[in-house]
Amino acid sequence: MPFADLHCDTISRLLHQQREGQPTTLRQGEPLEVNLTKLRHSGYLLQNFALFVDLHAPQTQATSPWAELQALARCYWQEVERNRDWLHPVLSAKDLDRAKAAGKLAAVLTVEEGGVCQGDLSRLGTLHRLGVRMLTLTWNYENELAHPNGQQGGLTETGFAFLSEMERLGMIPDVSHLGDQGFWDVCRQANRPFVASHSSCRALYPHRRNLTDEMIRAIGARGGLVGVNFYAGFLDGGPITRTGDILRHLRHIIDVGGLEAAALGSDFDGIDTPLELGDSGTMDRLTTALEQGDFTPREIDALCWGNVWRFYGTYFT
């Protein structure tokens, strides 16, 4: 079964390990939950690679969010160049076809934390030239653009300007981590579909990071995507990610938002709970669980890869 995943934090983890002096690479790095060897073994067609910047981390404080973002981007592109035989960066819809025809992984570059731009609208153009095609407006801190989950307040005036410029550039707005008011601000203001790359269902587990049914319906109605996060703390609050809980949230998204809204947003290399299904190298276990869980072949194809592939093919120029 092919797979497409809307979110992993592998590049940030990879750079951290390299800074610690570990000879880690994207091709076969351990203990990375995502590396190219594992992705190939599981048959991945597409992986989003997030450049995650913690605004309050010592490394970021010692330089700047923008400088840390640049370091992450250099790490990503160095790995792309080293692994051109196995992956193909996606900058346009044509790159999806090129990657698939060549039997390579389609790699989509994203940024997790709009605060890296420090409110400078011109930096969106720089990100786009760097290959970034999706941006989460916030992480867990208030920034110049908006308030995150658990805080009062929506998009700022600067945040609305960023949203408009992102759509002009063809950069997908990602509402994961965004506060409830900010979500609805995006929903009202956006002219194109948007995604929640790694969020689960609040009706099944009442965590503020999860989406309400109204939010899931809104994303589905706009033609967007919800990528289910594999973190146990968002699925049921337990100490281990049970595969059955992933399936429950996927089924709920299908039932509430429609089949075309359901996707995977694992958050591999960004979560700290062990998973029954293992990691990106053992995703056949998820396929087996879906088949045994009364998901139809059409549903499995759609949520495992088809919806993401279709969405990017229509969104990117």
Image (spheres, rainbow, N blue to C red):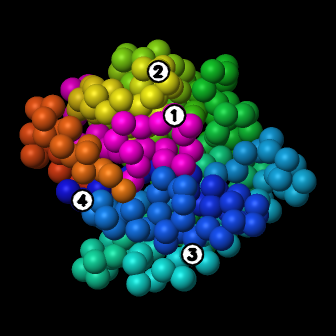
**Crowding near pointer 1: few (<14 within 10 Å), some, many (20+)?**
some
Mark sitting earlier along the chain (4/3): 4
For the N terminus, give its image quadrant. Answer: bottom left
**Crowding near pointer 2: few (<14 within 10 Å), some, many (20+)?**
few
Tell me if I can see residue 1 in this picture. Answer: yes
Query: Disc 3 marks which residue?
Result: 79
Q: Which labelled disc corresponds to residue 273?
A: 1
**How far is disc 2 from disc 3 in space, using C-alphas?**
35 Å
User: Callout 2, which amino acid?
Assistant: Gly
Tell me if I can see residue 310 in this picture. Answer: no
The local secondary structure at tag 4 comes to loop
**x, y percentage for residue 207?**
51, 19
Q: Nearer the viewer, residue 96 or 129?
A: 96
Determine whether, in the image, residue 126 is placed left or right of residue 219.
Answer: right
Query: Disc 2 marks which residue?
Result: 238
**x, y percentage for residue 107?**
44, 67
Q: Which labelled disc corresponds to residue 2?
A: 4
**x, y percentage for residue 146?**
67, 35
User: Callout 3, which amino acid?
Assistant: Glu
Marks 3 and 2: in contact by CB < 8 Å?
A: no
**Crowding near pointer 4: few (<14 within 10 Å), some, many (20+)?**
some
**x, y percentage for residue 303?**
25, 45
| Residue 265: quarter of image | top left
Q: Is residue 80 above or below residue 65?
A: below
**How far is disc 4 from disc 2 in space, using C-alphas?**
29 Å
**How far is disc 4 from disc 1 in space, using C-alphas?**
25 Å
- Which mark is in front, 4 or 2? 2
**How far is disc 2 from disc 1 in space, using C-alphas?**
9 Å
Q: Residue at x 20, y 38 (%)?
A: 289
**How far is disc 1 from disc 3 in space, using C-alphas?**
27 Å
Q: Is residue 253 above or below residue 315?
A: above
Q: Which region is colored magenta?
A: 255-280
